[in-house]
């Protein structure tokens, strides 16, 4: 059987590591559960660990959050569609916004429900994803400030999500200055500066994040422990929360280099084949996991001497050398994943998800 495993002990350790960082900085954070794709079993584990603020980009998944978590603070993380504003106001306490027309529609929806909807105004700082241009910030806020059923609780940004450029201290300081400008101009406090995602955590670990940055939206660091700036794993985090076990369906000694010109007829991108020479032989394990299930280039065998050499729709081929661990048919090869690979796996109905282990504190 091929499966994604969720290690409760490792999950708890990473949750505690994030809490320590946030407490030390005096910040709050919202757990981003997008990568879980609505998996309620994992959500229940997180609820039992005391998570209360949860962010999602799918309204159907927010419904699951509201069922599983006890009195959660819900954040809608995707810029709302005009056609969905009524549902957004119903399902989310807070939404991220960059269009006046959309916020006006949210105001109408909130008025119809006799409630106030909270928003964070997103500012473009270089990643070229969502966000208003800084030059229009005063006029934008002035228009939103006048809406009676909208409460602007802060400003925010997304960094490193689209263009992949690491965030800088200067960008974070810009947010601090923009908040100061708005508070002085309108004589109204803005409680939050929501600096972004897991990509900012390396700066936080190094003590470079301004104290005024007091809210984070974190998912990848919890589930994968990734240091998205320097590579590897964040200090004090674990990289074994979520792993992929793929069952071996064929194991044979074969040539290590293909015969003929490779990559000509394959519908998928060819992968590096190391330094294999014609005539060189070794064991190749075929595992029941393919391009249909995940982003194969985002998988890394946990055994450093194993190498993925290619994949089709349903099968991935792994060179395991001389098979020093005496693997057999039915055994599994374990992989770590990047975020893209994990997201595809969690959204696949063909892959089993299994919770393992227990928390250290019982």
Image (cartoon, rainbow, N blue to C red):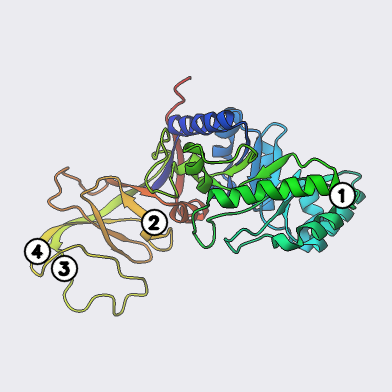
The image shows a total of numbered marks equal to 4
**Distance between the Cα atoms at labels 1 and 4?**
68 Å
Residue under the point 39% across and 42% down: 233
Residue 110: mark in rendering: 1
**Distance between the Cα atoms at labels 2 and 4?**
27 Å
**Residue 212 lies in quadrant:** top right
Q: Nearer the viewer, mark 1 or mark 4?
A: 1
Q: Residues within 10 Å of mark 2 (few under 14, many from 20)?
A: some
Q: Secondary structure at mark 3?
A: loop
Instruction: Pick the residue in front: 131 or 177.
Output: 177
Q: Residues within 10 Å of mark 4 (few under 14, many from 20)?
A: few
Q: Residues within 10 Å of mark 1 (few under 14, many from 20)?
A: many
Is residue 340 left or right of 59 when viewed as pictured? Answer: left
Residue under the point 39% across and 40% down: 239
**Distance between the Cα atoms at labels 3 and 1?**
63 Å
Q: Counting residues from the N terminus, which is met first, the one under dot 1 or under dot 2?
A: 1
Q: Is residue 144 above or below residue 237?
A: below
Q: Nearer the viewer, mark 3 or mark 1?
A: 1
Q: Counting residues from the N terminus, which is met first, the one under dot 1 or under dot 4?
A: 1
**Distance between the Cα atoms at labels 1 and 2?**
42 Å
Residue under the point 36% across and 60% down: 297
């Amino acid at each position: 059987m091929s499966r994604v495993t969720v290690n409760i002990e490792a999950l708890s350790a990473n949750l505690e590591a994030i809490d320590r960082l946030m407490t030390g900085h005096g910040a709050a954070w919202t757990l981003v559960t997008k990568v879980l794709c609505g998996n309620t079993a994992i959500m229940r584990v997180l609820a039992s660990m005391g998570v209360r603020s949860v962010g999602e980009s799918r309204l159907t998944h927010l419904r699951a959050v509201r069922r599983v978590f006890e009195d959660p603070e819900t954040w809608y993380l995707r810029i709302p569609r005009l056609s969905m504003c009524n549902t957004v106001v119903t399902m989310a306490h807070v939404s991220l916004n960059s269009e006046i027309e959309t916020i006006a529609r949210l105001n109408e929806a909130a008025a119809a429900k006799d409630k106030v909807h909270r928003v964070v105004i997103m500012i473009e700082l270089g990643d070229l994803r969502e966000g208003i241009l800084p030059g229009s910030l005063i006029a934008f806020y002035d228009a939103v400030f006048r809406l009676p059923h909208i409460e602007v609780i802060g400003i925010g940004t997304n960094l490193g999500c689209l263009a992949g450029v690491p965030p800088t201290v200067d960008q974070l300081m810009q947010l601090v200055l923009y908040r100061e400008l708005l508070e002085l101009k309108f004589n109204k406090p803005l409680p939050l500066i929501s600096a972004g995602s897991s990509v900012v955590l390396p700066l936080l670990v190094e003590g470079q994040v301004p104290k005024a940055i007091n809210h984070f939206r974190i998912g990848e660091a919890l589930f994968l422990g990734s240091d998205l700036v320097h590579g590897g794993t964040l200090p004090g985090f674990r990289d074994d929360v979520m792993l992929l076990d793929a069952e071996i369906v064929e194991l044979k000694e074969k040539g290590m280099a293909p015969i003929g010109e490779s990559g000509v007829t394959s519908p998928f991108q060819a992968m590096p084949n190391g330094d294999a020479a014609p005539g060189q032989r070794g064991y190749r394990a075929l595992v029941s996991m393919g391009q249909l299930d995940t982003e194969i280039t985002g998988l890394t065998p946990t055994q450093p001497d194993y190498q993925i050499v290619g994949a089709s729709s349903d099968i991935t081929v792994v060179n395991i050398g001389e098979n020093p661990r005496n693997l057999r048919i039915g055994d599994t090869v374990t992989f770590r994943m990047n975020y893209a690979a994990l997201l595809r796996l969690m959204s696949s109905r063909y892959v089993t998800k299994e919770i393992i282990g227990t928390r250290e504190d019982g």
